[in-house]
Image (cartoon, grey):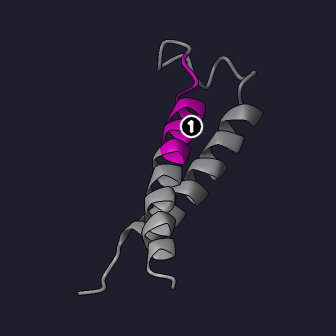
Amino acid sequence: MGLDIRLPIGLMFTIFGLIISIYGLFTNSNSEMYAKSLSINVNLWMGVLMLIFGSVMLFYALRKGLKKLP
């Protein structure tokens, strides 16, 4: 059918993961902000997980796209 949703999902998760990871790095020293989450930097960890997921989706989308080339 030709509809491959891996590329837009991969781009979205990669961009959001990058933004959230950078925010988590800049707010890493703010202990009051992460007191509710048992001093775990949730922004950094979720950003990294989103980056990994987005990268995997982009890898599979681009791998499929390159196989179609002659």
Residue 40, image x and y in percent?
54, 18
Residue at the outermost top position: 38
Above/below status of 28 relative to 59: above
Query: Is 14 or 2 nearer to us in this picture?
Result: 2
Secondary structure character of the magenta stretch overall: helix
The quarter holding residue 35 reads top right
Above/below status of 5 relative to 39: below
Residue 27, image x and y in percent?
72, 31
Residue at 42%, 65% (x, y): give it: 9
Asked if the magenta segment contains residue 31, the reply would be no
Residue at 44%, 57% (x, y): give it: 57
The magenta-colored residue range is: 40-52
Q: Secondary structure at mark 1?
A: helix
Residue at 34%, 76% (x, y): give it: 4
Residue 46, image x and y in percent?
50, 36
Asked if the magenta segment contains residue 41, the reply would be yes
Q: Is residue 44 left or right of residue 67?
A: right
Residue at the outermost front position: 70
Residue at 30%, 86% (x, y): give it: 2
Disc 1 packing (10 Å; few <14; some 14–19; many ≥20): many
Residue at the outermost left position: 1
According to the image, label 1 marks what residue?
Answer: 48
Amino acid type, mark 1: Val
